[in-house]
Amino acid sequence: MKKISAEKISAAVRQTCMKATVWPATIWSRPWPAKKEEESELGRATLDQLLENLKIAQKENLPICQDTGLAVFFVERGEEVTIEGRR
């Protein structure tokens, strides 16, 4: 049975979340041209919201999903692993 500390898990999840705040240029560059070409008012409003979410995430150094504005992470534990420490 492998043992791992809750502190190590927290640090790894924290590091992963912080990596999610770095937005590559490919993500930043896509909504701008799409907004100019979008014919639907609702579509343009949706792209505006997406761009606003991206700006907030970058400014506040927060992880953020590209479509819903909320980051979701799933952490799995193997059957032969015991977590030690606080939970």
Image (cartoon, helix red, strand yellow):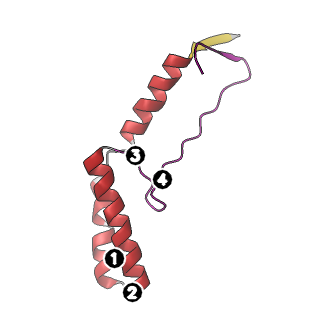
Q: Do the residues labelled 3 and 4 touch (CB within 8 Å)?
A: no
On residue 41, the disc is 2
Q: Mark 4 — residue?
A: 70
Q: Mark 1 — residue?
A: 34
Q: Do the residues labelled 3 and 1 touch (CB within 8 Å)?
A: no
Q: Mark 3 — residue?
A: 63
| In front: label 3 or label 1 | 3
Whichever of callouts 2 and 1 sits on the residue coming sooner in the sequence is 1
Tell me the residue at 45%/57% (across/down).
Answer: 69
Alpha carbons under labels 3 and 4: distance apart: 8 Å
Alpha carbons under labels 2 and 1: distance apart: 13 Å
Tell me the residue at 39%/86% (across/down).
Answer: 41
Alpha carbons under labels 3 and 2: distance apart: 28 Å
Q: Is residue 8 visible?
A: yes
Q: Quadrant of residue 20?
A: top left
Whichever of callouts 3 and 1 sits on the residue coming sooner in the sequence is 1
Alpha carbons under labels 2 and 4: distance apart: 24 Å
Residue 17, image x, y percentages: 42, 38
On residue 74, the disc is none
Label 4 sits on what residue type? Answer: Leu
